[in-house]
Amino acid sequence: MQTSPAIAKVIQSCLDDERTLIEESKAVDEQRRAVLIRLADERRRFAEDLERFNGQGSRESWGAIVREARNNMWAGTAGRNPGDAVAACLRSQHRTEVRYEEALETELSSEVRAALVTQHQSVHAARADLAKIEF
């Protein structure tokens, strides 16, 4: 069963967010790393759950790869620090949250909508988790 393109964008955004969280976890201490890895695992699970509805696999966007390269160049020039790493995760989280909101505005089956609502609430709550570890 093929669902809407909006769901495919949510899946892609979850995978992009997972990639960002994992990459940025390399620049932080163990306490922050544990939060970022937990959130990355959650995004992977969300993508896998939604892929079952979508009926096909997905992959990260080119934008995520470009953002990662840009962040790596910046870190190479200015040096890595935990605040910048968490800020990058917050930006990625925001992009993901927007994708969920866009998808929830489309016509969906009740089963897909229920999954999206639950996941969206969790993504929204992650903002607080990231804000706690930013500084």
Image: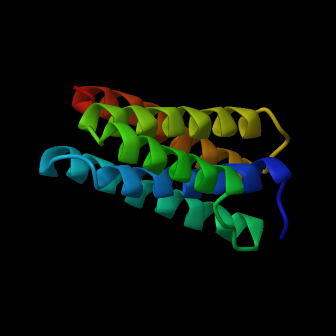
Depth order, front residue of 76/96:
76
Give the farthest residue toward the bottom. Answer: 56
Depth order, front residue of 125/89:
89
| Residue 111 at least partly seen | no
Q: In the rendered image, which quarter is residue 89 located in?
A: top left
Which residue is depicted at the point 39% across and 31% down? 87
Side (left or right) of 96 relative to 130: right
Which residue is depicted at the point 39% across and 56% down? 23
| Residue 23 at least partly seen | yes
Side (left or right) of 115 relative to 84: right
Give the farthest residue toward the front. Answer: 77
Depth order, front residue of 63/47:
63
Residue 78 image position (x, y, % from top left):
35, 36
Quadrant for the C terminus in the image:
top left
Q: In the rendered image, which quarter is residue 96 located in?
A: top right
Residue 58 image position (x, y, % from top left):
69, 68
Q: In the rendered image, which quarter is residue 84 located in?
A: top left
Residue 127 image position (x, y, % from top left):
40, 30
Please count the marks in the image.
0
Side (left or right) of 104 relative to 117: right
Which residue is depicted at the point 14% across and 51% down? 30
Depth order, front residue of 109/17:
17
Side (left or right) of 81 relative to 31: right
Quadrant for the N terminus in the image:
bottom right
Judge whether 135 appears above or below 60 on screen. Answer: above
Residue 82 image position (x, y, % from top left):
25, 38
